Image (cartoon, grey):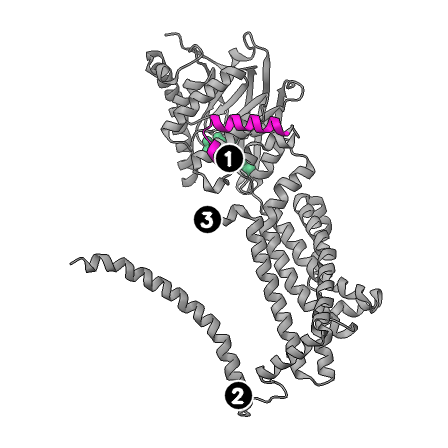
Amino acid sequence: MSVLPGSHPKILRKSGISANNRDRLISIASPIMLLLLWEILVRIGILDARFFPAPSKVFETLLVLIKDGSLWANTWASLQRLFWGFLLGGLPALILGIAMGLNHTLRALIDPLVATTYPIPKSAIFPLILLIFGLDEASKVVMVAIGVFYPVLVNSMTGVLEINSIYLDVGRNFGANRWQVFRTIAFPGAVPHIMSGVKLGVGMGLILIAIAEMIGAKSGLGFMIWNAWEILSVETMYVGLIVIALLGFLFSMTLTEVEREIIPWKKTR
Amino acid sequence: METTLTTPDLHTTSGDQPVKIRLRNLTKQFTTGGGPVTALDDVSLDIPSGCFFMIVGPSGCGKTTLLRILAGLDTPTSGSVEVSEPAAGRPGNSMVFQGGSLFPWMTVFENAAYGLRMRKRPKAEINEVVGHYLSRTGLSKFSHAYPHQLSGGMQQRVSIARAFSNDPDILLMDEPFSALDEQNKLLLQEELLRIWEETRKTVLFITHSVDEAVTLGDRIMIMTAQPGRTKQIVDVPFARPREVLELRALPAYGELVYSIWGQLREEVQRARTQDEGSVKS
Ligand SMILES: Nc1ncnc2c1ncn2[C@@H]1O[C@H](COP(=O)(O)OP(=O)(O)OP(=O)(O)O)[C@@H](O)[C@H]1O
Ligand SMILES: [Mg+2]
């Protein structure tokens, strides 16, 4: 009988697939179980609904906020600030970081400034930013920009410094000028590091936009959460938290996808 | 036997060809954690235009350092380097680097086209020239692949195509064939000889293989163990164009290889005893 030799690899393959599926099932099921447990605990009165409203209630509020358009308006306001903040902070950081990686004079000049200002909690300088840029859009955009600036700068610089020096030798030997070295060697060689800088920057930007909008804004997700506290609508607060978490998740998913697109030399393994 | 072994002193003036590269008392020291290391010590050399010049010597004797100085990537500690001007519009030199020097973020074609692109040559010319050398190195099918998708030998061939496509006045080749299997090495040696016959560029070619040195070269410099000096410069008398396998069947070929091996072995052994000495002390 040929049962043994034939069935053996099949069993192996089967168990491989089912283990995979089981993991996926667990990772879908676990949040659902948690929400269900939460719902039950609130209904039987073990969890205090004033602090932990039942998921069903939060969902109701979510629908209401979608319908009256305020959720979208606040999300859009935050997204715009994030976008401009990213551009304002990320682009100069990218260029300066790469330039610092290539030029040691520039690095010697700017590195100490970065090292001394980097550790200052960005939230601590918000009052100063408010003072300088006022209560309008500018102060929030600047906050995001500052948060994004540092991780992108430091990672771009590190990325260039870690490029194997033989690549720069090739550039020199084949007559690449400064700009060509920047474009064909420093930037592509540093892209993996730059991407991790951008990811850190996105996280920082989300934290700072929430804080900035709580204090000096009349719109945005941070404002929505803060306002919910003032009018004691805990459900709205939760909706705000969920949307921020969702944004963070979507950003990181998108960046991972972008990374795979622009680093094709690491994609196919 | 027609083999001529000559000391470097007799070669300070060259024969019929004008001198392309003139080195005088070239010395290079590196400062390292364990004190200064003399990589090159008082090397003086004339290389005639159009010469296929081979460099052999024990590992660590300063061969790569010599090429890097000629390429302008390192500066000598003392001594002088004179290189005659390339023809207008042609780059001075292009190097085939030892080991992985292809840009991982560029395809095979982009890597091979690098020099021409940096010099902003027209697209049609780039496509034609790069296509030509990719096909001569057997890589046409892989022009859109990335380096990590190639074998070590194929990567080395891209790096050769990159240097040739750039059409430099002087080719600097740092052990270009050492990562290749014997069959491909033979094919590429023949190919290189054929391309060289057409262009008659000045070539400086580092190798560990005495066979390769005698097969390809007009002149062979044997270097001493570190610190690297010129031990001997040997003329290779074989006529061109050469057929690699026919050449290797000649008795004179074997004799020349044997005599160079003798010189080289002394140095390799010296390098070894130096090494053991430094471990003991
Ligand atoms: N950047 C550097 N810093 C310090 N020492 C160096 C440097 N580059 C080379 N050396 C030293 O100079 C000597 C010559 O090195 P080089 O690379 O020229 O040798 P090589 O003849 O090419 O050897 P191989 O045949 O193994 O490639 C070695 O002792 C090496 O340790
Ligand atoms: Mg070497």
Which percent across, then down, holds residue B72?
A: 62, 29
Residue bearing the label numbered 2: A41
Q: Where is residue A128 drawn, in percent x and y? A: 80, 67
Q: What element carries label 2?
A: helix
Numbered disc 3: secondary structure: loop
- The amino acid sitting under disc 1 is Ser
Position of the N terminus of chain B by quadrant: top left
**Label 1: which residue?**
B143
Q: Residue at x 68, y 35 (%)?
A: A177
- Pick whichever, B206 or A222, lies toward us: A222
> How far apart, in angstroms, are the residues tagged by discs 2 and 3?
48 Å
Classed neighbour count for the residue bearing mark 2: other residues with Cα under 10 Å, few (<14), some (14–19), many (≥20): some
Q: Which of B59 and B179 is in front in this view?
A: B179
Image check: A10 left or right of A210? left
Query: Horizontal and vertical percent for residue A245?
Result: 61, 70
The span picked out in magenta is: B123-142
* Residue at left offset 56%, top offset 25%: B129
Q: Mark 3 points at which residue?
A: A269
Nearer to us of marks 3 and 1 is 1
